[in-house]
Amino acid sequence: MPRVNAVAVIGAGASGLASIKSCLEEGLNPVCFEREDDIGGLWNYTEDPRPGKGSVYKSCIINTSKEMMAFSDFPVPTDFPPFMPHGFVLEYFRLYARHFDLLKHIRFGCSIEAVNRADDYEETGRYVLTIRRTEDDQSAGVEELTVDGVMVCSGHHVYPHIPELSGASAFKGMKLHSHDYKIPGPFEDMNVLVVGAGNSAVDIAVDLSRTTKKVFLSTRRGAWVISRMGPLGIPADALCNSRAFFSLPLSVLQTLVKLMANFRFSHRNYGLQPTHAPLQAHPTINDELPHRIMTGAVQVRDDVAAFGAHDVTFKDGGHEEIDAVIFATGYDYKFKFLDDDILSMDNNKPGTGLYRFMMPAHLRHPTLSVIGLVQAIGSVIPISEMQARWHARLLTGGASLPEKAEMDSDIEEKSSRMKEQYVDSQRHTLQTFWIEYMDTIAEEIGVRPNLGRLALSDPWLSLRCFLGACVPSQYRLEGPGRWSGARDAILRSLSNNAKATQSRVLHDEPQGLQLSALLWLLIAVFLAVLFVWR
């Protein structure tokens, strides 16, 4: 492949920032185009919804703990809460961008209108970008820029998906998608229907329930609702996303997650019991829903059958008068600046085939990637970083893709697995397990930790990497991009989460005692489950 230098990064959210840094690590010259006037993408909260931009509501809190969503060589500050409201997430991105001096590589107020193959693409793999300034002054006009590579980091929570439901057009109350929801104030003393049972649906239902007269949560198939907090108040994702946990048979994992979900509250008694197993769909993360159902502020209802002018009928025959409906029904994945012959999406599935969910397998050169277009049971931020590291290596020749036939076979095999493992839904077209996917890309780069070799040189660290949370810093222990602070970040991950909650410090029991006890408990549970199963 011809020498690559200039790389366009489209979007300055988490994926875009990681892509800029990854390019710089490989000696490339990145230029990032961001349509807004600030970094953060989805996490750049605005009081007004903006078309073409990902959006969060004012009460939004990230669903993954700070140690599991951190960039691999930049831990979240100790004094940041374990689960960060959107303002803390954005501030973390600012700290990351300043620390690695990324802002000077970003052109704000620039919208990408088109990405096309250059005339010499067959020989060079280059692309031509059509760029428009997004400020009011249109005199700046449009410019074109030829680059050697492109990283698409524009996100996929941009274009709301609203299902076609009988009578919806005749409903005379307030209608909006969760993309446009910001605060509960406008819905005070209303009866509000929230359609959906994913993260946004449940968050919004809970948020509304303190202001409205009644909230009805309509679900087609129910949902497994998991709390952010696990035993001893330890983040649940830090306990479950471990190599030990995911080395167990899938049937055992399904049983353990189901027990954990129902130990907190009976999904059957609360009307949320689905027919699928917990890991056959993306779990819903929420801490408050059971309490809001128990107090009558939220009612779980069946799928919508039809709307009237001021009411809704459910498929089980139930009927309610409502004043507003919020569709928390997901998004249509679109990349309008890309021609279909580069990347097409069909019902949220890549029609052109994406190798490892990021590289269009049919293209002659590995010079264009889509970063962050994946749904994992875990944080997407470290996945985006890992993808960016791999593509930067591909661009410089430090890594290579297999032959097209092998990539096509892998894509087909992954597609078949998804159909077998997950519920058939628009939401599960890009689904994967977090550790499995991270290890797969890490293997391509040469940064997957070798725990056997590590056990000989650093047994305690090897044990923590296997039994403890698979924090992103594990992928900085060796290989390209190795970071000298990785060991310390891994060993401090539990205490770093805990310290932010210790605003009143107790002196009667050393903190390390609880953490050590938890680690030994995990060892005992893992060995017991393994013994019983085998």
Image: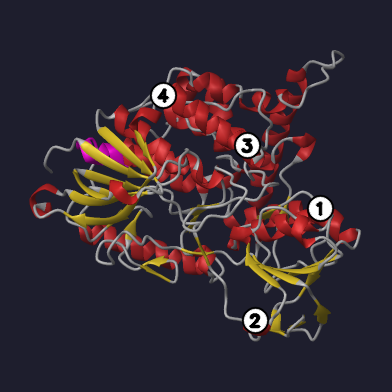
Q: Please identify, in this view, whether the residue under mark 4 or under mark 3 is nearer the observer.
A: 3
Mark 3 to mark 2 CA distance (whole Å) = 35 Å
Look at 27% across and 46% down and name the residue there: 150
Which amino acid is tagged 4? Phe
Of the two numbered discs 4 and 3 on the same chain, state the one appearing first in sequence: 3
The numbered dot on residue 100 is 4
Which numbered tag is attached to residue 87?
3
The answer to whether any part of residue 470 appears in the image is no
Q: Residues within 10 Å of mark 4 (few under 14, many from 20)?
A: few
- Disc 1 is placed on an element classified as helix
- Who comes first in sequence, dot 1 or dot 4? 4
Label 3 secondary element: helix
The x and y percentages for residue 524 are 71, 35
Around disc 3, counting alpha carbons within 10 Å, would you say few (fewer than 14), some (14 to 19), or many (20 or more)?
some
Instruction: State the predominant SS element of the stretch in magenta.
Output: helix
Residue 475 in percent (x, y) is at: 44, 32
Residue 157 position (above or below residue 96): below
Q: Nearer the viewer, mark 2 or mark 1?
A: 2
In the orientation shown, which residue stands out farthest toward the top? Answer: 507
Instruction: Name which residue lies at 26% across and 61% down.
Output: 342
Q: CA distance from mark 2 to mark 1?
A: 38 Å
- Name the quadrant containing residue 348: bottom left
Q: Position of residue 390 (x, y in %)?
A: 32, 40
In the drawing, what numbered circle is on residue 168?
2
Q: CA distance from mark 1 to mark 4?
A: 44 Å
Please give left or right for residue 50 compared with residue 199 in the image.
Answer: left
Discs 4/2, front: 2
Tag 2 secondary structure: helix
Residue type for callout 2: Ala
Residue range in magenta is 391-398
Q: Residue at x 69, y 29 (%)?
A: 519
Q: Which residue is mark 1?
A: 263
